[in-house]
Image: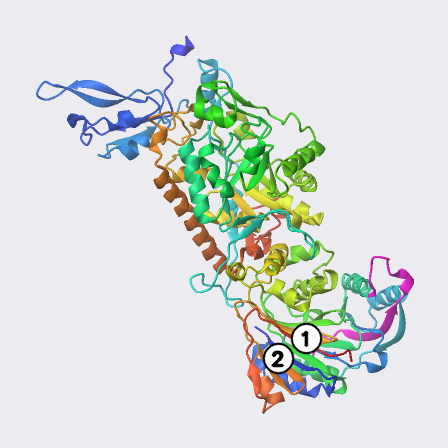
Amino acid sequence: MCGIVGIINTDGKVIDGSHIREAIRIQRDRGNGLGGGFAVYGSYPENKDKYAFHIMYEGGRNSPVISIVEDYLKARANIYQSEQIPVYPNDRISRAPYFKRYFLKPIEEFIAPEQTEEDYIVEVVMTINKMEGTFVLSSGKNMGVFKGVGYPEDIADYFRIEDYKGYTWTAHNRFPTNTPGWWGGAHPFTVLDKAVVHNGEITSYGTNVRWLEMYGYSCMLKTDTEVISYTYDKLTRLDNLTKEDACYVMAPSLWEEIDRTDDRKKRYLRQIYGSAMINGPFGIILTHKTGAIILNDRNKLRPVVCAKDGDTYYASSEECSIRLLSPDVEHIWSPKGGEPVIIDFPEEF
Amino acid sequence: MKNNWNIRPPFHPEFDLERCDYRNGCQICVKECSFGEISLKPIKGKDGNILYRPWANMRACNSCQRCVKMCPQSAIHIVSEPMHTSHGYWKTEPVNNIWRQAGSEGGVLLVGTGATGPQKRYFDHIMFDACQVTNPSIDPLREPMEIRRYLGRKTDQYGGKVGPQLKLEVPVMFGAMSFGAVNLRVQEAEAQATRKMGTYWNTGEGGFHEKLRNYGGNTIVQVASGRFGVSEDYMKSAAAVEIKIGQGAKPGIGGHLPGEKVSEAISKTRMIPEGSDALSPAPHHDIYSIEDLRQLIYAIKEATDYKVPISVKISAVNNVAPIASGIARAGADIIAIDGFRGGTGATPLQIRQNTGIPIELAISSADRRLREEGIRNTVSLVASGGIQSSSDVLKAICLGADAVYVGTPVLISLGCNVCQRCFTGQCPYGITTNKPGLAERINVDEATQALTNLLHAWGEEIKELMGSMGISAIEALRGNRDRLRGIGLNEEELRILEIKHAGA
């Protein structure tokens, strides 16, 4: 059990982090203080052409792993700015790691001919994540992730997320059931500019993870969220599926319906991507730089409510968060299991 | 001299004459026993007349239990001989075997069905994991539960091709049992049941009888080393063609159907002269390496216009993983792996008991190797050899199989008591025999119903098991070792099976 909230503005209008803090705070019952986190898009307009790496280091500011990571990064990328992420310790947060932020661009000559720039960045992130005592929290452009062990409102205060502004915000309140709570394992989970907040416990994990490993993904965190993020990344980035098709692969219709409609494309997708089907309960908000996707498992075993108010979309585990953000919202609905809500921005902000 | 020794068979029938209806002339057991174990013995009745009571000949009982099941008075039970020797190391079976070989039988000892040895049955050491609290189990009576599988070559990159597929509504197919090994009534029941349930049966290597050709849509035909009945028509008449390299009951061994079993119908179907021995050589004489197999695969694909998937069946051996990889790269669409428990009509005893590896380990290793090479999704894996229940089916799928073949469960559904005398042609249940008078013991309609019931029951049980694991579509279980746990397995076994120990 977990709580999730998303605020997505399709017109690029930014708001500060105090709103999402309140929206997730009132879902306090859905977590247990072992994980909270936020993703924000539009936070670094002055550096929007560079990859923003949020990296955590266990063992504090003197940890030897810092220089190992930085030497590696310097050899692979041009770092334009490097700074400590400001934190504001409070008595509800303990044993926090050390956080740094880097704005960088890959050194182009190192990008292999068969690689895109994004593939290259993923490779860099994967390499760092395999190192002991460090973890890349986020690596997309003009976005960032703040997360840790604690209730989400306490994590919000620790990073003072009200100091950041964004057109898309997501939040997660964690009630870990599988993996122990640690700072890197809190949500949101990201690959490049894609961030996932997730409520669920998928039963297809063993099949999904083995399928992903065939294509070079290594699932270090052993969490469902990681698997869902990588599956979506593999489908859309490597296989060039549309968002609709990628959602269909993860939560397909029944064979019976495919037979009835004789939908060849759906049969084809289910046949070739059987191992990418996400089974078991899940509700996710997947955000990226030009939109968002809200998706439920096909049996709707987890709650997700959506709403639209003007040019702002909301998604939440519970309606109360939406009512708090937009008290008079009229267009509010509960998407059916397996039917994605896909939000596309008219342009990149 | 030795030939005169009275070596008692391991079993014999005993008759409760209080219950037995011999006084009214009942002789059902005598007629039902196809091994000649029961005869009639004249005795004097109370009023001086002669009555005939059943009598055990102490010669040939296999505990097939036919007499027990057919006796209207429940007057028969089979007893097992306590032992032949009192020696702690030389037990009954090896001593008996040596007596048989040194005595009149001589030669290679033959048996039917799969291996009986004490080797570990890994399925029994594997448990499913179930859902509690943090993720809900799914009620198959309320929610849709999908167990359909597609077998055949598939691209793993969007935009690529999906080859011809077999569509299975139940992830269970009937494994290869040839016309000759079983009779046409058995095959007809298999064909009808698989059509009804949306799955497939396999002709084995004995050809495809004309009478059953209209069931081609649910039939897999075999091309084995003897090439019996193989023609262009034969291959085009089926939903898939399987190249048989080996089977679990006799890895590395060919087959032998004695001439006396080659009747007119079998002769026509196999395309060999009546009364001649049907010998399948141990290897295919045109396959001495993987590249030869590739040529045969493509020869068959050419002959069938690339319209049906080609399967390659091998027995489970230690090198199964690289062999499976080679077969996938040689162009096969389906790889069937048969574990050492797999059944047969006839196999040398020593081969059956001592060659091959368990299917659980073989399928796990093959699945892992294909994944490591990034080609797992291009080919389908079928597991067989000793599968006894729906939970075995699902465990095999969690260990990496796409579907399974079963053979012995088909025979058991038709009454088989697993007495292991299939090779004699005397099957008392009329299954592994073509003898007039015996074969008629199979009623095709009843047999069809029995096989349909079995497939239906296993399908329902599979749905229940999936529900408890919180899975609503079976593809989410293929290779899903995380849903399994081992009990009483050592680290090496757990590593090969790629599962954690229970409690972990």
Magenta highlight on residue A179: no
Name the residue: 36% across, 32% down.
B429
Point out the residue furthest to the left here. B47
Q: Which residues are magenta?
A: A93-117
Name the residue: 46% across, 28% down.
B180
Residue B365's x, y, as percent? 64, 44
**Residue pointed to by mark 1:** A292
Q: Label 1 amino acid?
A: Ala
Q: Which element carries disc 2, helix, strand or loop?
A: strand
Q: With respect to residue B42, does A278 lie above or below? A: below
Mark 2–mark 1 distance (CA, rounded to whole Å): 10 Å
Q: Which element carries disc 1, helix, strand or loop?
A: strand
Magenta highlight on residue A114: yes
Is residue A178 or residue A92 the one in the foreground? Answer: A178
Quadrant showing the C terminus of chain B: bottom right
- Left or right, residue A22 beside residue B51: right
Question: In the rendered image, which quarter is residue B15 located in?
Answer: top left
Checking the image for residue A133, the label placed there is: none
- Left or right, residue B489 beside residue B215: right
Point out the residue furthest to the top here. B1
Tag 2–tag 1 contact (CB < 8 Å): yes
Quadrant showing the N terminus of chain B: top left
Query: Closer to the N terminus: mark 2 or mark 1?
Result: 1
Residue B346's x, y, as percent? 49, 27
Checking the image for residue A315, the label placed there is: 2
Residue B443's x, y, as percent? 34, 36
